[in-house]
Image: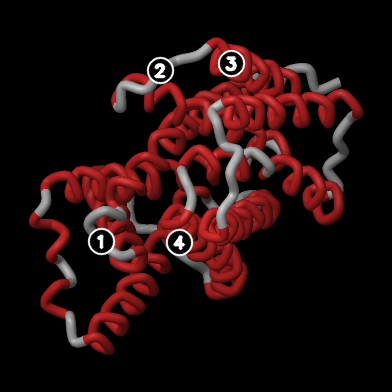
Amino acid sequence: MKQLKREVVAYAGLTLMTVIIGFSFIFVKIALRHASPIDLLAHRFTAATAGLFFFYLFRRKGWPVIERKSIFHLLTLSLFYPLLLFSMQTIGLQFTSASEAGILSATAPIFTVILASIFLKEKSSFWQIIFVLLSVGGVVYIMYRNGLGEISSETLKGDFFILLSVVSMAIYFVLGRKATQQINAMDITFFMTVTACVIFNLMAVIAHLKLDTLPLYFAAFNNSEFLWTILYLGILSSFLTSFLTNSALSVIPASQVSIFNNFSPVIAVFSGVLFLNETLHVYHVIGGIMVLIGIIGVNVLKK
């Protein structure tokens, strides 16, 4: 019964995570209007770290204790998430649309199932594989019907970086599954977030020093739109989603955690309808149902 409760909480957290990530594609596109990719990443993880410290201050249960023997494992995990994942994703979104990024993000379960079967010995049944493909097909169907037909060299460049971020995500799911069996999920989140904050800020400062533009480091914050996007991307889309993912990986197999990402691109479409006045078509509904059936099939109908 206790394990069942933990799984229910984990699935609820993953549902919240997919909603946050679904909106994050739009927020990244908005933030890139005002800042370079490296500045965006630096400010994003500064906000995430600030949110993390406030969490610990209000929690009043002590700060995380990272054992020396765990540092190498955590550094390896942090390399793929958040360092490579968010770097590649942010660069890619400079050259491609949020919708096309969603198409490639939908392939994450395929990479995760393959890697999890090799390194974690997680077995996927025939029907689980079918439901993964159904979910991926739902996202691809939506984006295809959304009019994504022409491919330019810029789009290919963006898609290449997005694909690298997807592979990084799949590797992170596999490595994170092992790490969460030995290390507390909140401690992992703390280490990953602070590491990304330090590295991205160092990279941004060095870049500005080379260009002699250090006074412009915080210039983007003069725009209120950038401030709100950074708070969303930092506190919700970085800190909170990292914690929810690490918590879920301590309870649920990596392949099942990964499938939840397929719902994020669908949310991105519907958020465009709500906030950008885009038109909702029948194929959006059909594709959304395909994604939902795929998620249910993999996570509920396990046998």
Element at label 3: helix
Q: Position of residue 296 (x, y in %)?
A: 68, 18
Mark 2 sits on what residue? 279
Give residue 266's mark.
Answer: none
Element at label 1: loop
Question: Mark 1 and mark 3 in contact (Cβ < 8 Å)?
Answer: no
Residue pictured at 45% horizontal, 15% vertical? 280
Residue at the outermost left position:
222
Amino acid type, label 1: Ala
| Front of the two marks 3 and 1 | 3
For the residue pair 120 and 165, the one nearer the viewer reads as: 165
Question: Mark 4 and mark 1 in contact (Cβ < 8 Å)?
Answer: no
Q: For the residues marked 1 and 4, what is the alpha-carbon distance in whole angstroms?
A: 12 Å
| Front of the two marks 3 and 4 | 3
Quadrant location of the N terminus?
top right
Label 1 Cα neighbours within 10 Å, binned few <14 / some 14-19 / many ≥20: some
> Viewed as shown, does residue 302 lie left or right of 40?
right
| Front of the two marks 1 and 2 | 2
Amino acid type, label 3: Tyr
Mark 1 sits on what residue? 35
Q: Earlier in the sequence, mark 3 or mark 4?
A: 4
